Image (cartoon, rainbow, N blue to C red):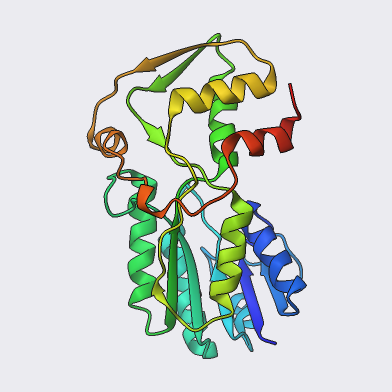
Amino acid sequence: MTTILVTGGTGTLGRLVTERLRTDGHEVRVLSRHSRPYAVDLREGGGRLDAAVEGVDTIVHCASSPRGGDERAATHLIAAARRAGVGHLVYISIVGVDRVPFGYYRTKHTVERLVEESGLGWTVLRTTQFHDLLVQMFQGLAKSPVMLLPAHVRDQPIEVGEVAARLAELATGAPAGRAEDMGGPEVRTLSSLAQAYLTATGRRRAVVNVPLWGAAYRGFRSGGHLAPERAVGKGTFEEYLTKRFGRR
């Protein structure tokens, strides 16, 4: 079996990737800022990163932060992987990073290019948004008596466990370049998803769709972040809500 390093291995996705790989019998190292013995801040790099990467066959790069620093982290990780002779770098990205001019998407697209130009064997998987990300957004919006949503925007949420299974599969195979995108089973309006969340949590809120402006909003409104032709996910948003909040 191979030795695989999972960056961000304590996060929502990385934890499930780690569990899947270990269940399949692989030796897995978990790298995060606070995970011993491979506690590394990728934005800083350094000797501890080299020690974490030494002897690794494959890296699954799940670590990411909307607060910035992803490009610097990827640069350090790729340099360490080159020094260690890592054969395969797998990166998780987002559908639409090349179509929607949103700041975090631009960062993810930049990291994709760094991976592609790294000189390493590489695989990039793009997926639509995870169910739990929508719930986080709705939880914040529901603090007000009125939930304000961007008008005419749809989403295609996917079950994170399905993405983890696919990443584990890709990590144990040969470098595949750009893998086929993964989208959730349904393209839904944000308002219908918000109503499902409110029903599942027993909350009563007015939902109001508000037109916005700007290039990023136009990109989302036009569906640049969707992959209806790759609706390969099985778990629906309602099924996720039931598992998380129970039946109401």
* Residue 20 at x, y percent in the picture: 70, 67
In the rendered image, the quadrant that contains the C terminus is top right
Residue 3 against residue 124 in the figure, above or below: below
Residue 1: image quadrant is bottom right
Residue at x 41% of width, y 69% of height? 179
Total marks in image? 0
Does residue 120 appear in the picture of this structure? yes
In the image, taking residue 14 as reference, residue 98 lies left or right, namely left
* Residue 61 at x, y percent in the picture: 53, 67
Residue at x 76% of width, y 30% of height? 246
| In-front residue for pair 150/62 | 150
* Residue 148 at x, y percent in the picture: 44, 17
* Residue 182 at x, y percent in the picture: 46, 56
In the image, taking residue 35 as reference, residue 153 lies left or right, namely left
Residue 158 against residue 115 in the figure, above or below: above
Residue at x 41% of width, y 59% of height? 181
